[in-house]
Image: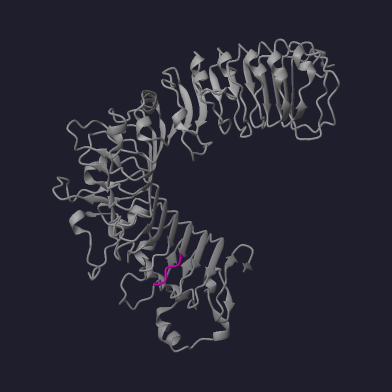
Amino acid sequence: MLEQYSAISLLGCKISGLPEVLNCPKMESFILYNEDPSLKIPDCLFEGTKTLQLMDMTRVQLPTLPSSLQFLEKLQTLCLYYCVLGDIALIGELKMLKVLSVMGSNIVRLPREIGKLTRLQLLDLTDNPTLEIIPPNVLSCLTQLEDLYMENSFLQWGVEGLDSPRNNASLAELKYLPYLSTLYLHITDPMILPKDFFSKKLERFNILIGEGWEWSRKRETSTILKLKISASIQSEEGIQLLLKRTEDLHLDGLEGVKSVSYELDGQGFPSLKHLHIQNSLEIRYIVDSTMLSPIVAFPFLVSLSLDNLNKLEKICNGQPVAESFSKLRILKVKSCPMLKNLFSLHMQRGLLQLEEISIIDCKIMEVIVAEESGSEADEDEAIKLTQLRTLTLEYLPQFTSVSSKSNEIASDTRLRTPMTLFNKKIEFPYLEDLKLSSIEVEKIWQDQPGELSCWFLRLTSLIVQGCRNLKYLFTTSMVESLAQLKRLELCDCVSMEEIIIKNGLGEEENVRGVMLPKLQFLKLEGLPNLTRFCTGHLIQCCFLQELWIENCPTLKTFISNSLSTDAVANNQFEETNSTLFDEKNGLLFTGGEDRNITAWDVNSGKVAY
């Protein structure tokens, strides 16, 4: 019955066994995705499939390859994914083979016989960290090879020119592959790089040079380069060639570089889309526009990540050329202790496409955007970050506001009027996620936010942690603009007394209702001075699904009528059965003084401890 089939595909089939011989004289494709580790491949299985051109087997036990493979004279593609393989020397007899993959099969040795595959165009050794031996002159025999994948694989490259005979292939062998256009490999020792190793013919590459790098499965570009090398190797012609063609660049421990853009690429990296720089003791600027002939820098850069740059003073020194950073969408800065701000107003063109800003652990960071002295920018003109969706500010002990003139940044901690985190200089009309952790501001929003409130109409997640100077989070007028808020977390804010206060602290009228119509998750943790959520008769959270209250020892009532404040102060309430929630909310929990409730699931009515 199988004689007429040209293809067999067994995907996830639970079969008890395979026939001794597949009698399929017309079959061109055989695919087996195995889920049974006990499945055996008969030695003569492929004797009747001499027209087979593609074989793809996954998770198959093959300690010895079936001898019938040698009859597959027309086989062009052989893929053995995540198989258990022993000796694979028999593959060398498949003279018509063009594609060979042993991805994830943990081979230890690439046999010398692989060098016989002179028609091979693609060799995939991905995910074979156990591969330790590739005999010399095997790779150089694969003269038709176009694609070589060695991701998370072979590292033991031999060094050409040593007196002792080599046990392993050398990088120089790859220079004898005239059609090689795709190369994925890791070179842990930069000193063994041959001269003129990298060719202009490389169209796609993922190359790691230096120790400590890890492979990333997330690939948004076809050219990726990760460098951890000395100053002498940075200037090599081959490295410079790769730098100019790389779209995703990672740099670790740069030596002798103070300004990245012009010192590493005199053309300003016109093709670069992603840049990650880490662990440098010398970099002062990413771009230095004070040079005699400044040029457009990073015109197509989409993401910029700066981590542990101890001397970094500015991202851009001076006024950048127009179109610099004009496509930037993601900016992440971490552990840059000399950085006071991200941008000056000179760079506002480079801010307009930003979708995500993250600033973490920068000891003297004061603002995101600083208006420097002598700036010709219109003082009344706001910067509108219409694309920004995510803002994260963490561990910034000197941070005062998202924007301020440099000469207005408060340095006197005795000033009576605290600066608010958000002001009218920068607008965030589409912000969705806001996380604040360990910053020293006393107010996030102005008490009377006015037009500021409309900038947070799309906020869906607000997380505030370790902000020890905050006594309250919102005023009632600010809450009105948070109709889209779904997640609210407040943790370890030791001065927090109330989450929502009335606009005027001297007003006597009650707040009749506070609405958070889409709130689904509310967490209050580590708030030792919190006495209530808000003052008023009613808070409406119609879609609340999960509520966490933990380590809030002074929280006696969730909602308090302001007229009963004196009564509460005089302990005129039932201590053993005080009500934490108003029944009108659909949330009701009663108990004594012990408020160590960790979770309340509104839908199930269950309390988790």
Front in this rendered view, residue 578 or 163: 163
Q: In this view, does 603 lie above or below 210?
A: below
Q: Place residue 59 in its image quadrant.
A: top right
Give the side of residue 196 with respect to residue 136, left or right. Answer: left
The x, y position of residue 488, in whole percent, is: 47, 60
The x, y position of residue 517, in whole percent, is: 47, 59
Q: In this view, does 34 lie above or below 508?
A: above
The x, y position of residue 176, in whole percent, is: 50, 14
Residue at (34% x, 78% y) in the render: 508
Question: Does residue 517 appear anywhere in the picture?
Answer: no
Q: Is residue 447 above or below residue 510?
A: above
Q: Is residue 494 magenta?
A: yes
User: Number of labelled discs?
Assistant: 0
- The quarter of the image holding the C terminus is bottom right
Residue at (28% x, 40% y) in the render: 258
Q: Does the magenta stretch include residue 361?
A: no
Front in this rendered view, residue 198 or 205: 198
User: What residue range appears in magenta?
Assistant: 491-495
- The quarter of the image holding the N terminus is top right
Residue at (58% x, 30% y) in the render: 154
Q: Is residue 312 above or below residue 54?
A: below
Give the side of residue 396 with respect to residue 81, left or right. Answer: left
The x, y position of residue 423, in whole percent, is: 27, 57
Front in this rendered view, residue 103 or 139: 139
Question: Does residue 89 appear anywhere in the picture?
Answer: yes
Q: Please, what is the dominant secondary structure of the magenta stretch?
A: loop
Residue at (44% x, 21% y) in the render: 197
